[in-house]
Amino acid sequence: MKAWLCCLVHLTALGFLLGAASTGLAQNAHPLSAEERQSLDEGQQKLRAALDALNDRAAADVADAAIFAKGLAWGLRYDATFTPADVALMQKGLARGMERAQALAAGKHPWSTRTGKLALAYVSRIDGSVQPYGVIVPAGYDRSKPIRLDVVLHGSTRPVGLSELRFLSRFDAGDEPGKAEVAEATTPDMPYIELHPLGRVENCYRWAGETDVFEAIEDVCRRYAIDRDRIVLRGMSMGASGTWHLGLKHPDRFVALGPYCGYVDTHRFSETPLPTFVKVGPLPEHQELGLHMLDSVDYAANAGVVPAIACMGEKDVFFQAHVLMGEAMQREGLTMVNLISPGTGHVIDPVTHAEQMRRIGEFAARGLNHVPNEIRFITWTLKYSRCHWLEVLGLKHHYARAQLAARLRGETIEIDEPQNITRFAIATAQLPATPKTLRVGTTELAVPKSIGSASRGIVVARSATGWQIAGELDKTPLVGKRPGLQGPIDDAFVAPFVCVRGTGRPWNAAVQVYANASLERFAEEWRHYFRGEAPIKDDTAITEDDLRTRNLILFGDPGSNVWIARALPQLPLSWTKETLRFESVDYPSADHLPALIIANPLAGGEGRYLVLNSGHTFREAELAKLNYLLFPRWGDWAVLQVEPNREAATAPLERVVRAGYFDEQWKLPAATGP
């Protein structure tokens, strides 16, 4: 076997085993001695000072050094005991952070021209946090020639304080000449660069973990000459689940998918006979609907757009996951490629993996076809709306199957009657020529001559009389739910956001106590499990730039939070000091409050979300347990009842009275009673 393939198999398997390895390390762990703590604290202060001295540089330029300081800070905050190896890892992190900070101060960054394994980082647009990733650059990399990129997603690993430093240690071969020369001498000569995102540790590449993958891709494309038409997505275990999840929902972003042993749904996977698993039984209707956003098996038809070469061990405890996906593809008229490794369990078999990589290589060599003559695209939400030259812009009902199928036929585009779709776009700028005619179902539409080569695309919408051309893409106003503004509440935290603390006099003390405690809880859960500091401001400190560039996450009531008061007249509810009216049902405001997400109705906030009184709707109990439990609990909205006499210092508790989704116009459905 080629040396580079052996290395690849080892690294991918290591990603799955990382969690088990870290658990084993804890057997000999102990609290830091006074001397160890003092040494690390002093080193941390020096590193922070060195990084502060670089504050005239762009944050992105300092990220490769700052990530070591961040890794140490999280380790000391969240881990109570450490093995000797952990202490050595933290000391090395201090040294490596200082080495890079000193190099940057001298105007140098020697790691930027190195090949081999490298520990790098970027600054996330979501929360301004520094997030790590690893790359493996082949020895023969030529910066003048665009190269294929393989995005390799790691397996499940329990989030701990030292997660970043342990992850970085897999890729940090040093920057100084001596170590760099040794590292480069042993660099595998792969025909691609490998990118290993951390994905904010453990979420199956959902929510901010999904954003992390795409932000890491963009950062690698900024640093290296990447051929964007040859980006492969693959991974093992949780990494395979992430590959199914991201690849089938973004089928025009990747040239091929390589999932090795990954789950594809929630219910069936939760029934795996493992002692640590939690069975997900029948859920409330709104939670069942939300699973259609996450379960990749529902997007099986999109494997007709992006090729998937899957692998599974014959004796893998998760074998049925790929059986489930194969059955789904068969129902879509597709045949799943699933290479079975004889006699193996939940591990990577080198022979099977070599065949997978060979087949992936064939697709990668051809590159992406951005203008396929035929497309059939399936989605269940406007969160996943685009496939090459087609984009879904409106649905009849969210979390119901929607299908858009089209064919290029000379000067005509034939479109099957769209299913569960109210408007869509054709990106004519991507086509060889602007079509003259559209045939949507049985309706034939002439493309206006005004839509020419300078137009990015055409918007087609269903009216009371049938399908019609609504105008040019980017010039046609979109109302109601639309791509990027479709909910649920948890979707507000995949893009830049700021939490807004109410500082005024609340209408009801119990509600404000809950709101403040809820904000504190979310900030801690975000810090611990999404590895960043949640941006928080007082309501009086919010600027027009915040309104324009971030999702506003508002905590409090109209008395305490000025932004809730401003938005209240345009919200789909009635809220006074005495009564909260929601779905035509009245609740006492003394101990009830709304949690919701909506397209920001405030002038200047167009294109952003506005959220009331909620962070993520899954909590510590799910975040600390199993990644398949991270599904939306409240949908777009919930009415919460809080304890009227609860102390401010205690953890927030709420009873969900009602929860559900707004309709496609961000309105409440007809009331059905409490």
Image (cartoon, rainbow, N blue to C red):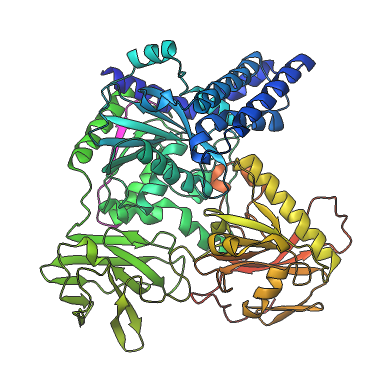
Instruction: State which quadrant residue 35 falls in.
Output: top right
Q: Name the residue rendered at 20%, 57% in the picture.
A: 371
Furthest toward the left, the residue is 410
For residue 95, side relative to residue 39 (left or right): left
For residue 238, side relative to residue 142 (left or right): right
Q: Tally the numbered discs.
A: 0
Instruction: State which quadrant residue 114 falls in.
Output: top left
SS assignment for the magenta stretch, majority: loop
Q: Position of residue 413 (x, y in %)?
A: 18, 70
Q: Is residue 196 magenta?
A: no
Residue range in magenta is 332-345
The answer to whether any part of residue 260 appears in the image is: no
Quarter of the N terminus within the rendering: top left
Q: Is residue 339 magenta?
A: yes
Q: Is residue 583 above or below residue 615?
A: below
Q: Position of residue 575 (x, y in %)?
A: 73, 77
Q: Name the residue rendered at 40%, 37% in the picture.
A: 319
122 or 663: nearer the viewer: 122
For residue 464, side relative to residue 125 (left or right): left
Instruction: State which quadrant residue 454 falls in.
Output: bottom left
Q: Name the residue rendered at 35%, 51% in the picture.
A: 248
Q: Position of residue 521 (x, y in %)?
A: 72, 50
The answer to whether any part of residue 299 appears in the image is: yes
Quarter of the C terminus within the rendering: bottom right
Q: Position of residue 289 (x, y in %)?
A: 51, 63
For residue 413, side relative to residue 317 (left or right): left
